[in-house]
Each structure stands twice: as structure tokens, then as C-alpha cells.
Image (cartoon, helix red, strand yellow):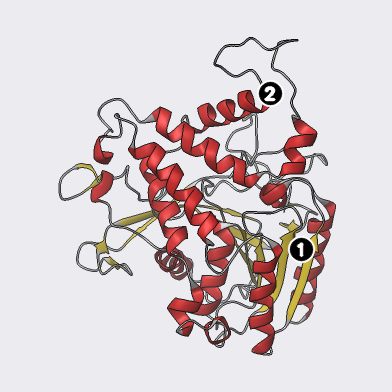
Amino acid sequence: MSEYTQSDPKGISVGIVEKQFFTFAKKSDPLKLESGASLGPVTLAYETCGTLNSNKSNVILVLHALSGDSHMAGYYTAHDARPGWWDLMIGPGKGIDTDKYFVICSNIVGSCAGSTGPASIDPETRKEYATHFPLITIGDMVEAQKALMDHLNITSILSAIGGSVGGMQVLEWCIRYPAMIRSAIPLATTTRHSALAIAFNEVARQSIMADPNWNQGHYYNGKKPDIGLALARMIGHITYLSDESMRLKFGRKLQNRSALSFEFGAEFQVESYLQHQGNKFIERFDANSFLYITKAADYFDLAEQYGNGSLVDAFSKCRAKFLVVSYTSDWLYPTYQSKEMVKAMKKNNLDVSFCEIESQWGHDAFLLPGQRLENLIRGFLRSISNDN
């Protein structure tokens, strides 16, 4: 996803937070993956905000998107320039009110922000896993999160909330552990990738693997495939925006010039912007993790996995109350895909609310300041809490 951190316009923050770690799945009892492979030990980085009530009934599980991490809100130190990626939504009095709820977010397995992934050390070889890391699925990510919930002695989740790949995890949670999830808010997401989404992911992956520094994934002791990863980010970033947002923000404006230079280079502002996003991304993300997570997203298909091709059957075991949200300008996961899941949910007589929010900012709109989404989430969580 695009850069998450936004300034908090209200100046209300959860304050200083701590990155915590949980390790499980020892060699004698590894995490069994959907591919048939096993993984262990497994470490998850996670963060919590708010206070767990006495009967542990106020838990909100936040699931992050492709390039996100466990740092959802607040600051690690008083000197941090920017807060967590969803600080605009999580905090005292905000949509996810930390005065009321105990909020948990963990970095997904396969990522590179504290959780076990390709850049982690393989205990067998004492070297980075690299591409010896087994392929993972959205379901494997949820299984690791379930282990964390068990570790925290949490047996009921008031609401699971996430956008994009985080929304996929929300849906997976609802089907795998229906008794645990009281409500769910999947945002700007889908039950399976379209051919278009898979195509963009494949081009991005090929950009990384075509970089000579990729070295079949074994680059950790040498030069990294920075050019390939930057290109992959640029490709992905285009899908997170919209035609209207790019027209309004950039148009055909030139970058630091009044006329065409008739040279190759970043002449247009949109070219400079994409290059900037790509260069920033290589400073914080691992190329192999990008490969693994995008592949997991492409594999995700609820109808095939749980319903023999029927999305209605896939949702048949769910018990959660749903708030499904899409955006008018999201062409990566367009509204028709949200409507498909809503229709399947309603055919199972589930309690479902649906809202398509008008926005010009494309897929990333759920990460940007928006009073409409904040009000929706606040009201929905209030209604669930009142059902207790």
C-alpha cells in the first residue's frame, strides 16, 4: 500500500507504544502450512493499545495490508516524526476508540517488520531463509494470529477490521473461527483476486526477479535488488490510486521545468512521484517478502477453498455481523466485488451492512483522513458493544 502515516488533525494520540514479540511453533510442534510444509519457530511482532476489560469482551483485531506492520498507532518514542499507519483511526475518541477497546495488530508471517519471513534466520542453516522460506497463504497468516490470541488468552474478538490484504484476513478469520468473531469490517477488499490484480502482481514480481541483484532470492549478504523492488512498488502504487486522483494531483505538470527537455528522465510530476515512492520503499521493505505476500494474495479464493466454487457456501459457517465498505474510485478491488460478498452473506441470512463511499482517491482511500469511514466504524462498533 502507499505510505500509511498521516498527521493526526485532532492532536489525540495513544501516546508511546511498544513493539512486542511472541514466538511459538517450536521444532517439535511447527506451524503446519496449507502448502503441506511446516515452519518453526515462528515469531510475530505485535502492538496493543487501550485496556483489556475484565471479561475480555472489548478486543478489536486490526489486520494490516501488504506492506503494513504491527505499528498501527501512537509513537515508539517521543522523537518519532510520524505515528503508526492508522493513527488517524485508532486512539482516544477516534473511530476505534482506545478509551473503550483493546486493540491488537500483529505483523503478518512472511513480512519483514519483526515477524518471521524470508529475511529471518533459518535455524537449520543459520542463514537467511531467502527463497527457501515456504510459500504462505492468507490462511497461514490467520493461523499465526490465532496462536497469538491463544497466547494472550483471548477467546472472543469483538471486531476484526482490515483493508485490502488486511480485509482478506478479516474474511478468513470469519470463516476459520466463526465462534470467535462477533463482527467484522472488511474494507476495500475482495474474496479473490481478479485476473487484472494477479497480472499487476506478476509484473511487479517479475520486476524484482529480473534484477540481477536478486540472485534467486539470496541477496542478503550482498547488493539488494533495489531497482527491481522500486519498480515493483511503482507498479503497485499505480493500482492504489485512481485516474481522477492522479489527474487532480499531477495532471501533465512538469517537474521543475517550464518546457520539455527532450531527454529521458522524470520530466512529469507523476514520474517523479512514482520514483520517490519506489525509492522510499526500498528503505523499509524486503523484496522477498513482497514476492511472498503478493503470491499469498493471489492464491486467496474463498469460494474455491471453502465452498467448492460457491461463495454462498463459503460464508455458510460465518456468524459475524458485517460492515462491508468499498470506494467508488477503487479499480483494484471495485465495488462489484464487495457487492458479490454482501450478496453471498445475505443468502446465509447474516446481518450485513454495506456502504460504498464516494471518493476520488482510489484504493488507498481507507488509509486517508475521511470522516465518513470514521463515523461508520464508530457507529458500527457502538452497536456491537450495545449487543453485549
* Above or below 207: residue 118: below
Say which of marks 2 and 1 sits in front: 2
Q: Are marks 2 and 1 in contact (CB under 8 Å)?
A: no
Q: Residue furthest front?
A: 262
Crowdedness near tag 2: few (<14), some (14–19) or many (≥20) residues, C-alpha within 10 Å = some
351 to the left or right of 25: right
The residue at which mark 2 appears reads as 269
Rendered image: mark on residue 30:
none
Question: What residue is disc 1 on?
Answer: 377
Where in the figure is residue 80, as x and y percent of width and height?
62, 30
* Mark 1: secondary structure: helix
In x, y percent, where is residue 94?
A: 78, 54
Q: Amino acid at mark 1?
A: Ile
Q: Quadrant of the N terminus?
A: top right
Instruction: Return the residue nearer the eye: 225 or 309.
Output: 309
Query: In the rendered image, is residue 112 in sight?
Result: no
Q: Give the residue furthest to the left.
A: 125
> Relative to 377, is 4 on the left or the right?
left
The residue at 62%/54% (across/down) is 332
Q: Is residue 14 left or right of residue 300?
A: right
Residue 173 visible in image: yes
Which of pointers 2 and 1 lies earlier in the amino acid sequence? 2
Rendered view: 46 above or below 35: above
Disc 1 residue crowd, few under 14, some 14–19, many 20+, Cα 10 Å: many
The residue positioned 76% from the left and 30% from the top of the image is: 251
Position in image of residue 369 (x %, y %): 78, 46
In which quadrant of the rendered image does the C terminus lie?
Answer: bottom right
Q: How far, Cα to Cα, is label 2 from label 1?
A: 35 Å
Q: How many marks?
A: 2
Q: How far across and how far down the image is residue 121, in percent? A: 26, 44
Identity of the residue drawn at 15% across and 50% down: 124
